[in-house]
Image (spheres, rainbow, N blue to C red):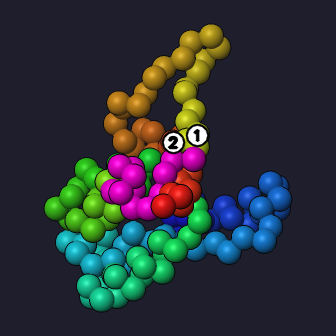
Amino acid sequence: MEKDEGLLLHRAAAEYGLEGYEWRIWNPYEVAGVSSVRYQAPEVSAEQTETYLQNLLTTDYVIVGSSWAERFTAAVAQFPAQADFYRRLSAGQAGYRVLKTFEVTPRLGPFAWDDRGAELTFRLFDHPAITIFVTAAD
């Protein structure tokens, strides 16, 4: 699970009976290649990145929000490894397939707005799409 969504794990376990799982938190800034001054990412070697991702990608499920995926795929030059990871994950090239996607369409009474093309910060704080990936059979 991505690090921001990981903050809710204690609540998910209590409210939804998600007991008996070992949770791993994916921190996209703990991989090499970040060149963004804004995010002040720590220095991480290619070897650390490989070890981190190999450990992470031995899970049965991967839970991601659209806000992280879109953030990194929109800034490939600053986050090359992260963008590649999300691209490969969504393309079914990371050993996982989509199990379920949860999306909320904003509504006001009977009116609904498809805001999937809206500016990212409008969507990511209020209602990002959440996708659960499961390990592919092969």
Residue of label 1: 102
Residue 100 in picture, x, y percent from top left: 58, 43
Say which residue appears at 16% left-offset and 62% top-offset: 77
Q: Residues within 10 Å of mark 2 (few under 14, many from 20)?
A: some
Residue 11 in picture, x, y percent from top left: 75, 61
Depth check, front residue: 88 or 25: 88
Position of residue 1 in the picture relative to residue 124 (left or right): right
Position of residue 107 in the picture relative to residue 73 (left or right): right
Say which residue appears at 45% left-offset and 23% top-offset: 114
Q: Against 76, is 106 above or below?
A: above
Residue 49 in picture, x, y percent from top left: 34, 81
Q: Which quadrant would the N terminus be assigned to in this image?
A: bottom right
Q: Which mark is residue 79?
A: none
Q: Against 67, is 22 above or below?
A: below
Say which residue appears at 53% left-offset and 54% top-offset: 133
Residue of label 2: 129
Q: Helix, strand, or loop for circle 2? A: loop
The reply to whether residue 125 is visible in this rendering is no
Say which residue appears at 34% left-offset and 82% top-offset: 50
Q: Which residues are magenta?
A: 88-99
Position of residue 14 in the picture relative to residue 108 (left or right): right
Answer whether residue 93 is magenta in the image: yes
Label 2 near label 1: C-beta < 8 Å?
yes
Residue kind at label 1, given as amino acid type: Phe
Depth check, front residue: 52 or 13: 52
